[in-house]
Image: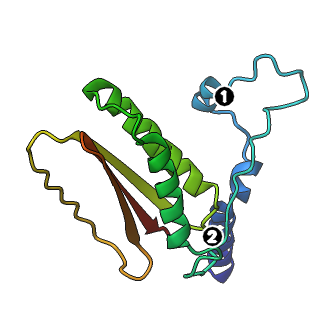
Amino acid sequence: MAAAAAKNWSGLVNLCLGQEREKRPASSQRGSLTKSHIGVPLGMGAPAAKPTMRFMPTYRLESKNPLNKERVENIIKAVMNRHYNDEYMFHPKHSLHMAAQVSEEIKNRIKLDNYDRYRYIVLVTVGEFLMQGLYSMVNFLWDAEKDGFVTYSVERPSYFAVCTTFYLYYD
């Protein structure tokens, strides 16, 4: 009885490790219908599958290259002042595309600094001064030590432009 239990145990271990599947011939109809070897020279068998990459956890809680808030502020100021200067005229249709281009440029320039494990959200809002008010609210659940935001605004007599960049630490 002990020998039968040992044989069942080793069979279970082999099945879990995948060794038992390799020994069995693929003679079932289902296997032959789903696995096609058309176009493969005789004797070559099925094409080998690529091995999957597995990464070990790093157990790091801090970034190797932490985000420099002053550097991000300088990038935002430079891009916003270059695009939204005195020559810029507000137009509803053109301002939408301009805001999208500016936010993409800011995000790409921040990514070039290779801050480790951060994700960015860049919002650019452009509006025309026509005796109206603007209230905006954003609500996040974040880590107060590692996550944050940078805001910069440009005000001209006829329009305003506000850029808010959120940086979120990603473990």
The foreground one among 29 and 78 is 78
State whether residue 1 appears in this view: yes
Q: Is residue 154 left or right of residue 102?
A: left
User: Is 93 rendered above or below residue 115?
Assistant: above
Q: Residues within 10 Å of mark 1 (few under 14, many from 20)?
A: few
Instruction: Say which of marks 2 and 1 sits in front.
Output: 1
Q: Residues within 10 Å of mark 2 (few under 14, many from 20)?
A: few
Pointer 2 with pointer 1, Cβ within 8 A: no
Q: Position of residue 24 (x, y in %)?
A: 72, 46
User: Is 44 rendered above or below residue 1?
Assistant: above
The foreground one among 146 and 106 is 106
- Name the secondary structure under disc 1: loop
Q: Which amino acid type is marked by label 2?
A: Asn
Residue for badge 1: 35
Mark 2–mark 1 Cα distance, whole angstroms, equals 30 Å
Residue drawn at point x = 38 percent, y = 34 percent: 88
